[in-house]
Image (spheres, rainbow, N blue to C red):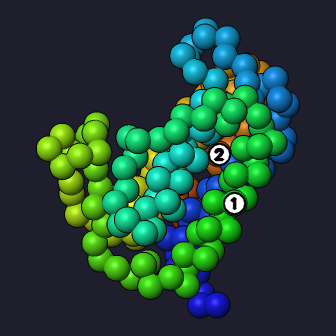
Amino acid sequence: MKQTPEVLQSNIHFLEQGIELLTSITDELYKKNNGAYHKSGIGVHFRHIIEHYFSLINSEYSGIINYDLRKRDLRLENDRLFMIELLQEVIEALKKLADSPKLLQNHVEIVCNEGNDSENSLISSSSIVRELQFLISHTVHHYALIGLILKTMGYIPDEDFGVAPSTLKHKKLSNTVERVS
């Protein structure tokens, strides 16, 4: 197997971070939505994240990714252990993608609005690597919301959960500079 490209490693890192969080919380926290500061519980955010990954993975043969046409499987919002299992499946699929010639392709069609027919859809060009970059950003964004929701319920996630890679890098460099000073 070839060395996994950095963009895949980053996606895998964040998915593993999600698994780590999910193994540390209760089913009640996963399903809970008290509505005090948010309209959805963390299970909804995890479902949204993983369905975006499945949109990419399932586009392998068609070459078209449609992030809008997702199943929205409610079991994903309520079954924490099932979500962990699917996150692990996505990680394995991403590892296989490292060996795929598709990773090197420079064209993917992205459906940018509702509908799946050419008359009602706007299709844009992209690449698998670019979409993997998008998924990192999208995942971290939702992790930040998940972290905030958990804090409102009295659970404090790891301090790096939901923090962008560029912020973590800046923080690490700042700490290094402070120690040297």
Residue occupying the point 82% across, 35% down: 25
> In the picture, residue 45 is in which quadrant?
top right
Q: Residues within 10 Å of mark 1 (few under 14, many from 20)?
A: few
Mark 2 sits on what residue?
161
Q: Is residue 112 visible?
A: no
In this view of the protein, can residue 91 be seen by the observer? yes
Which numbered dot is residue 89?
A: 1
Residue at 62 percent of width and 74 percent of height: 95
Residue at the (76%, 48%) spot, across then down: 84
| In the image: residue 110, left or right of residue 30 | left
* Residue at (50, 82) in percent of width and height: 100
Give whichever of discs 1 and 2 has the lower sequence position.
Answer: 1
On the picture, is 118 further left or further right than 97? left
Out of 98 and 34, give the one closest to the viewer: 98
Q: Secondary structure at mark 1?
A: helix
Inspect the image, locate mark 1, and give the three-letter code of the amino acid beneath it. Answer: Glu
Instruction: Please state, as top left, top right, bottom left or bottom right, where the N terminus lies in the image.
Output: bottom right
